[in-house]
Image (cartoon, grey):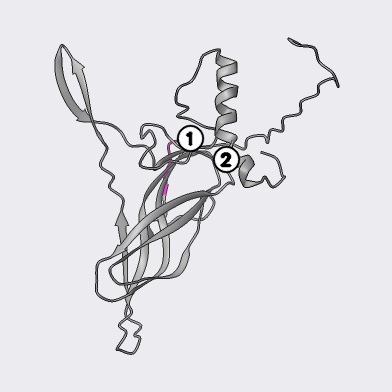
């Protein structure tokens, strides 16, 4: 939270320190601390929570891509597709059909990466929100070219997109003494963008000697 570079062993204890602070403030013992200052959303986190981003700070989305073909594939100019809703309810996207300027979002581009045959690769895409509102990560757009090992490389490539479609988990509930099954919500790609927040630095001043209970 300050400008100093913290050692890895300090960062590993941060979650435990937060638990102690929350227990002290609330006066209750916390069995599982399921929220933290800057959560990382994954398959194990609570899907109904909206991630929170700050204007001017990067948001990273890691995607697993799989090459099912028997030849390596080259991925070029890949970037996230997004839909942004301002506080005035105006909606903007970076789809080519509704191209917008970079005054709302700064979209990072993964220039070139090769996915080997029958392999998986993890790609990290980055996005920087520049104004307040609601940001939805809709999918990813890319250019794809086959890298045949026994042939000369060609300029033929396909421009395509993959829209994300995450199936929310099922949840069982009881209503009117009857068991019901339904779907939960999944908000991991629905980001609330807030204004700049202050950096906080803790400064504890204590006397040289302290008696018990002080």
Where residue 16 appears, x then y in whole percent? 56, 30
Instruction: Tell me, for residue 87, which label it has, or none.
Output: 1
Query: From this viewpoint, is residue 97 visible?
Result: no
Region rendered in magenta: 88-92
Q: Determine which quarter of the picture holds residue 14.
A: top right
Label the magenta part by its dominant secondary structure: loop
- Residue 120, by quadrant, is bottom left
Please state which of residues 212 and 17 is positioned toward the viewer in this rendering.
212
Element under disc 1: loop
Residue at 43% of width from left, 36% of height from top? 89
Q: Residue furthest top?
A: 213
At 69% from the left edge and 33% from the top edge, which residue is drawn? 200
Q: Gap between marks 1 and 2, in whole Å?
A: 37 Å
Q: Percent x, y for residue 104?
A: 51, 48
The image quadrant where one finds the C terminus is top right
Residue 156 occupies quadrant: bottom left
Label placed on residue 12: 2
Q: Residues within 10 Å of mark 1 (few under 14, many from 20)?
A: few
Q: Is residue 170 above or below residue 93?
A: above
Residue 89 colored in magenta in the image: yes
Q: Residue at x 45, y 29 (%)?
A: 34
Along the polypeptide, which appears first: circle 1 or circle 2?
2
> Exactly how many numbered labels are in the figure?
2
Q: Is residue 77 magenta?
A: no
Tell me which residue sits at (33%, 80%) in the image. Answer: 147
């Amino acid at each position: 939270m300050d400008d100093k570079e913290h050692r890895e062993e300090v960062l590993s204890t941060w979650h435990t320190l937060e638990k102690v602070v929350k227990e002290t403030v609330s006066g209750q013992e916390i069995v599982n601390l399921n929220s933290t200052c800057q959560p990382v959303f994954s398959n194990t986190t609570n899907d109904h929570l909206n991630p929170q981003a700050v204007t001017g700070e990067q948001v990273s989305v890691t995607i697993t891509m799989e090459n099912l073909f028997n030849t390596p594939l080259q991925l070029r100019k890949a970037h996230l597709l997004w839909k942004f809703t301002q506080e005035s309810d105006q909606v903007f996207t970076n789809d080519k059909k509704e191209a917008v300027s970079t005054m709302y979002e700064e979209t990072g581009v993964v220039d070139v990466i090769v996915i080997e045959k029958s392999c998986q690769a993890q790609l990290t895409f980055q996005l920087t929100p520049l104004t307040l509102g609601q940001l939805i990560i809709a999918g990813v757009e890319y250019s794809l070219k086959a890298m045949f090992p026994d042939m000369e490389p060609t300029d033929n490539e396909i421009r395509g997109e993959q829209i994300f479609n995450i199936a929310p988990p099922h949840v069982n509930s009881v209503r009117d003494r009857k068991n019901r099954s339904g779907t939960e919500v999944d908000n991991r790609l629905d980001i609330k963008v807030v204004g700049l927040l202050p950096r906080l630095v803790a400064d504890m001043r204590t006397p040289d000697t302290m008696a018990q209970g002080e």
